[in-house]
Amino acid sequence: MLSFIGQRLLQSCIVLLACSVLVFSITEATPGSVARKLLGPFANGQQVAILTEALGLNRPAYVRYADWLGTILGLTHVSVDRSAMKNWSLPSLDTNTYFGNFGYSTLYKKPVNQVLWDRLKNSALLAGVALAFIIPISILVGVICGLCRYSLLDRALSIVCVVTTAIPEFVWGILLITVFVLKLGILPGTAPLQASGDWSIGQQLALPALVLILFDFGYIARIVRSSVIEVSNRPYVRTAVLKGLTRWEVVSRHILRNAMIAPLTVILLQINFLISGVVVTEVIFAYPGFGRMLLEAALFGDVSIIQGAAIVAVLLAILTQFLGDLGYRALNPRMRDA
Amino acid sequence: MSNGIIHQGIEGLVGQMERNEISRRDFLRTATLLGMSAAAAYATAGLAAPAAAQNLPNGGTLRIAHPIADVSNPQALNWFQFADLTFPVVQTLTRIGADNVTRPHLAESWAASADLRSWTIKLRANAKWRKGRPFTTDDVIWNFKRLVDPATGSVSLGLMQPYLLNVSESNGKKTVEFWDANALEKVDDHTFRLNLKIPQVTIPEDLFTYTSVMLDPEENGAFGVGSNGTGPFEMVEFEASKRAAYRKWPGYWGAPAHVDSVEFIDFGDDPNAAVAALASKQVDGLYQVAHDLLPAVKSLDHVNVYSASTANNATLQLDCTQKPWSDPRVRMAMRLAVDPKKQVELALRGLGKPGEHHHASPVHPDYAPLPPFGPDPERAKKLLAEAGYADGISADAYVSTNLPWTVASLEGMADEYRAIGVNLQVKPLPGSQFWEMWGKTPVIYSDWSHRPLAIQMYALVYRTGVDWNTPKWSNPDFDKLLDQASGIIDPIKRREVVAKMEDILQKDGPMVQPLWLDVQTAYDKRVQGFTLHPALCIFPEDMAISA
């Protein structure tokens, strides 16, 4: 087990390093200068040139990559010569040396870490609420469909699953806002996560979570259904039935446990998606999450946020995959011996 | 007269108004610029002054959906809309109201010399900083010097350059100094004088430019949570792209605010989100309603919708130093090919006015109607052929996706250009990338905020060599006329000069200007005291909210 974990950690480090090169190269290729973004569109060339020099943005890309990586690893930090910028009210770009320092956000005017972890926490909250419903509902629906395969109930539930998954998030968003906000007036139309209004945080979470539940549960339910059907046809299930076990015993002891192996990976992948990829839902409901932050940063050209968020998203993917592998090993004894 | 001195120009204005040579509105605007109080000007014009709402309720929190951008350097802001985030705390010397009339704000009164070259501005004796110190002439002088320092990056520099500054440039470095040692003169602790290089009638209006806010010299121009100011609120929370919150300053030297606190909340780039927030009463008002969302907002029973015709607009700027745009015939052809009426319908759903390609709006008091201009695609084709482009022209035109109506408008214009053989490739870019291209690409479609006078816009954008003249257009006759118009009090004579400038822009100008934008916004019916400002300025101290 220890060697498995060690092996995976080493692989993760290599993947992260490769991704850091990729992320830096891609952001390097995008148009626009950081100095111009800091100073605004009407700053004159002289101001842009001074800041470009002060931030060291005119150095070769590989030197800046090494600096960036060194800053993240806590080996160095950004230092700015502010003597030529006496009137600029620029935020303190100088940052401390610490591990995980992703630099300074030109959009939010604060260290990337302060924004990134706050937004990640918000997205994790939304993902948590959504998953709390998605997992039991999709497993329940998937198992019912799998056990009653090709029945009228299976077909009806399958149609519901396919339709809810096929409808894009933005359509769900508009539909739910029309019904619950404009017609019934019982839920808020946005979720800025500020308790100062008349709506509680729980009420604000309701619609974005509902969109994610409706959009996602059908997909997992279909995977569970397929897995249940596949496991139900296995010889050991037939043997259990022939041994005279009750239907409940067969389902709970032999079908469910084995049928969960494949959906586990899918569910863990959904965690990754729900935390870092829910851009549309977060934008529709003005939810201050990770996806909306990434979109805003991309539109603004906030390179530090894009780079930091990309690395964190990769880290999240690696982590969920790692957990998936651990879960897979726990559910499947054969993997433990492999 | 607030200062006991009647500017000699006012008597002439009264006579003109009585002879119906100028409208009462013209009188109001010009007389107040010359130092007459708004109340006296309204009374002289026989008009009822807009009454401040009476018996407004006190208390509560006013919540407004509003974009939140960095405002750490208020004197270097790039957009009028973000001044809404600074105005509650730091103030300007004057204020232009929703009626387009300029009133004293931190200033108490002003008086201009007969030749409009000397402006004496008296500050309110009771105005003070929140941290206790009185607001004095020294504060104003410090702020003026900071505004014209190129290192500040303020647009005020370009605005004041013609009449207050000498600017030289060598090796790409701009050096700025006041044109005269006495240009900015301290008279006493509450009075200062601007001694100008050339006559200028727009001084009081220029003092309301969104960058001309008075910052506390003791804080060295820094602005943020807890910053000192003379305004009725204190900023207590600020997070870019999220939220800005303000608390009422009980010791405010002027009329106290009605609401206890104000919150501006950023709902992101999707305008639907702000409307959804208004629908579910998460906010009490919106900064602006997009044209396509107006029907949805109008369907909400609990909101009032406000609309105003403004001088907000967009222009297709053509770099006059690069071929083919350097040929005036090509630029003229580009103007003649466009049907402004079609543009208003297409891009604004009819909620605007057709442009006339000279950047003076019918809402501007100095607007002069010219004979109808175009569209005339046939003549446009002939002009292109004469200029040597009978086979057509291909070019990329950049536009910001931040304003969907500008994209729709440019796409509509591109369709019309195809008819004359001009293949304009529309290149929509996110705001950040778009502004990277601003001033660097030969063809760009750029929006402009409302300004109270056409000559202010001309001074900012079309005068030779100013920063915002990105097409690098230069017309000495235009510059001379602009100097001349800036020194004329008589609205009729000024309009005559503006007519000549409009004509020059139509025939030789560096841009195509297809439309004027009407603006709309919406507030909960519980909100009282709101008036829609043509520049969409929000003054929360004038507003109240009922329980």
Image (cartoon, coloured by chain):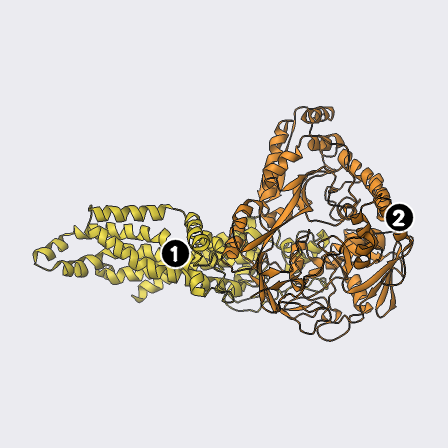
Chain colours: A yellow, B orange
- Across and down, in percent, residue B273 comes to 51, 53
Mark 1 packing: few (<14 Cα in 10 Å), some, or many (20+)?
Answer: some
Of residues A243 and B487, the one nearer the viewer is: B487
Q: Which residue is mark 2?
A: B15
| Quarter of the figure with residue A7 | bottom left
Q: Amino acid at mark 2?
A: Gly
- Across and down, in percent, residue B89 comes to 68, 66
Q: Residue A210, labelled with which disc?
A: 1
The residue drawn where x is 55% and y is 51% is A299
- The secondary element bearing badge 2 is classed as helix
- Across and down, in percent, residue A234 comes to 16, 52
Chain letter of disc 2 in the image: B
**Labels 1 & 2 near each other (Cβ < 8 A):** no
Chain letter of disc 1 in the image: A
| Quarter of the figure with residue B187 | bottom right
**What's the CA distance linking mark 1 and mark 2?**
69 Å
Residue B55 horizontal side relative to residue B34, left or right: left
Q: Quadrant of the N terminus of chain A?
A: bottom left
Q: Nearer the viewer, mark 1 or mark 2?
A: 2
Residue A234 horizontal side relative to residue A84, left or right: left
